[in-house]
Amino acid sequence: MNYPSDGNETIPTDFDDVVQQVSTGSLAHQKIDELLHEAHERYSDVDDGLLAHYIPILGHADPDLFAIAMSHVGGSVHEVGDCQHEFSIQSIAKMFVYALVVQEHGREVVRERIGVNNTGMPFNSVMAVELNNGHPMNPMVNAGAIATTEMIPGRTSAKKWENVRAGLSAFAGRQLTLDDDVYASESESNERNKAVGRLLKSYRRIEGDPLAAVDVYTRQCSLNVTAYDLAVMGATLADGGVNPVTGQRVVDADVCRDTLAAVATSGLYEHSGDWLFEIGIPAKSGVSGGIVAIAPGKGAIGAFSPPLDIAGNSVKAQLAIGHLSRAMGLNLFASAPEKSLLAKAGRG
Ligand code: GLU
């Protein structure tokens, strides 16, 4: 039993002995390819949004690239557009690294060290750390993600990096490689992340060398993926931790559930609440223009287009995923009256 001590740290929980049931239904839609093409065609000409510039090399991306892929938990992957174009995974890595760390250490250890609440502040906020006495609060913002990366097993940072890469590669079902140019560009411009790392060290949220932790974090952000990879990686979280294409178990089903809950609060930066309100499925976005959205028990959509909105989320990727979520009935909060119950009540 865990009741909050001061009324607002966390919600009360008193149901550990109740068996967790799963009731997600399956993906009903037969026309995945048709809907993917429809969404791609519909939003291809949208030219809103700006390229990210704070990591210099991202400002050189081709703004016209546009890809949508969907991986079904049954193992089929559907794609339209530039689905084989590689881009750096950026913040989307946070979600998968968090899953690997929860798998390794257990949910409560990671929850105590990192937290799962939205900070209400920008993803690279130093103030969020200060205001919360050094508690990062959330694994999807940089402070929480750097502290999470440090918890990846490995005695040296080279070993930690190898484990991050191997873990994310297992989610993707192929060996992912580092984009050396993005890593170099980001390493030269990440003073703020280094400051966050040092601040976390001062609060003992990081045990080892904070700059080594930031370096592994920077490498994880610089791993190359495609929209196709994102769909498969997301579908692994939708499929109880088993990669639906390779059949390999990557993490436990409980870890997927916890990870998606953490992502739902903050996957789309300061627009995470609006995203959940409008689209209704957990999603994680990255500053290079990728978004992966997960429909538990059904599948996942990976979308990519570099121009971003004011919060740092790809404009076209949001539109495409929103369209597909509606057309396929993916919204987790949507329901329709149960006909048999209405009939019993004489209202059917
Ligand atoms: N590597 C970027 C950073 O740490 C990730 C930003 C993002 O994708 O949100 O600033």
Image (spheres, rainbow, N blue to C red):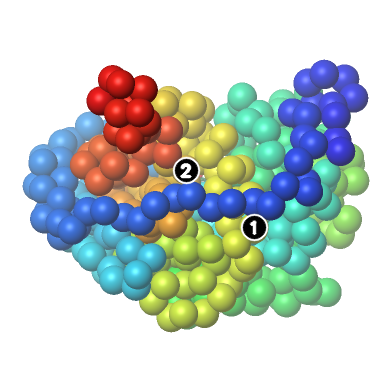
Helix, strand or loop at label 1? It is helix
Earlier in the chain: of badge 1 and badge 2, it is 1
The residue singled out by tag 1 in the image is: 254
The residue singled out by tag 2 in the image is: 282
Residue 39 image offset from top left, x and y in percent: 16, 46
- Residue at the spot x=65%, y=76% of the render? 162
Residue 271 image offset from top left, x and y in percent: 46, 28
Residue 192 image offset from top left, x and y in percent: 65, 40
Amino acid tagged 1: Asp
In the rendered image, which quarter is residue 157 located in?
Answer: bottom right
Residue 89 image offset from top left, x and y in percent: 46, 58
- Residue at the spot x=87%, y=20% of the render? 6
**Residue sitting nearer the eye, 226 or 4:** 4
Rate crowding at label 1 as few (under 14), some (14 to 19) or many (20 or more) other CA atoms within 10 Å. some
Amino acid tagged 2: Pro
User: Is 151 placed left or right of 170 in the picture?
Assistant: right
**Residue sitting nearer the eye, 53 or 158:** 158
- Residue at the spot x=61%, y=26% of the render? 121
Rate crowding at label 2 as few (under 14), some (14 to 19) or many (20 or more) other CA atoms within 10 Å. many
- Residue at the spot x=39%, y=76% of the render? 245
For the residues carrying marks 1 and 2, which lies nearer the camera in this image?
1
**Residue sitting nearer the eye, 236 or 120:** 236
